């Protein structure tokens, strides 16, 4: 019993000495579908948005040990009255890229069920974003087939939840 307590206490002290903190936050991007295209204008500056989010949490990018997306949620926030759900989106894919790095699938979904206005988009498992942050020029991309294209403008919101492991020493 005493040996177990000492081990747990030593493990706690060792973990604290390592100085590893976890920071979780959500970055929201707004977009729209209109004129037969999917657009999220802020995605091109995602790296800058991410750096501001880290700075707001007093995290120096050099102290990031790991950064991963834990969830991506797409929501219809407004429609022109004719489009009722996300069924017009097919082969939806979000990618991440940075200077000198190939675009990689971040999350995606092939189709949506009737009535779906909000959906959790499956994230690429174990995708490490730290190399994209370090490379600079980090951007996200979005693509999908619109079938049929919605007859009215549809406003969208994309919530990207990130988990950042930070070396606090």
Image: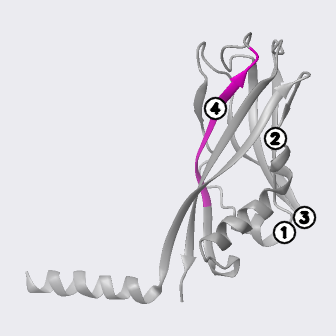
**To which residue does mark 4 refer?**
75
Task: Indicate the secondary structure of the residue bearing disc 3.
Answer: loop
> What residue is drawn where x is 47% and y is 84%?
19
Question: Compared with residue 166, is residue 79 higher up or lower down, i.e. above or below?
Answer: above
Please provide the residue range marked out in magenta.
Answer: 68-80
Q: Position of residue 152 (x, y in %)?
A: 82, 16
> How many angstroms separate mark 4 from mark 2 (CA)?
13 Å
Check residue 100 in the rendering and tell me which mark sits there, or answer none: 3
Check residue 136 in the rendering and tell me which mark sits there, or answer none: 1
Tell me whether the residue at label 4 lies in contact with that at label 2, contact meaning CB atoms closer than 8 angstroms: no
Q: Position of residue 64 (x, y in %)?
A: 63, 75
**To which residue does mark 2 refer?**
40
> How many angstroms separate mark 3 from mark 1 (CA)?
9 Å
> What's the colour scheme?
one colour
Mark 3 vs mark 2: give the one in front: 2
Dot 2 or dot 1: first in sequence order is: 2
Dot 4 or dot 3: first in sequence order is: 4
């Amino acid at each position: 019993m005493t040996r177990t307590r000492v081990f747990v206490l030593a493990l706690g002290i060792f973990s604290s000495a390592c100085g590893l903190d976890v920071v979780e936050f959500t970055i929201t991007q707004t977009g729209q579908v209109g004129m037969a295209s999917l657009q999220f204008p802020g995605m091109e500056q995602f790296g800058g948005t991410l750096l501001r989010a880290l700075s707001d949490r007093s995290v120096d990018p050099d102290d990031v040990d790991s950064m991963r997306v834990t969830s991506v949620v797409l929501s219809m926030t407004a429609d022109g009255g004719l489009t009722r759900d996300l069924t017009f989106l097919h082969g939806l894919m979000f990618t991440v890229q940075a200077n000198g790095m190939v675009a990689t699938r971040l999350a995606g979904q092939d189709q949506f069920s009737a009535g779906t206005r909000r959906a959790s988009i499956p994230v690429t498992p174990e995708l490490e974003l730290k190399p994209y942050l370090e490379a600079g020029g980090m951007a996200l991309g979005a693509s999908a087939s619109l079938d049929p294209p919605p007859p009215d403008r549809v406003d969208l919101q994309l919530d990207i939840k990130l988990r950042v492991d930070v070396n606090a020493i």
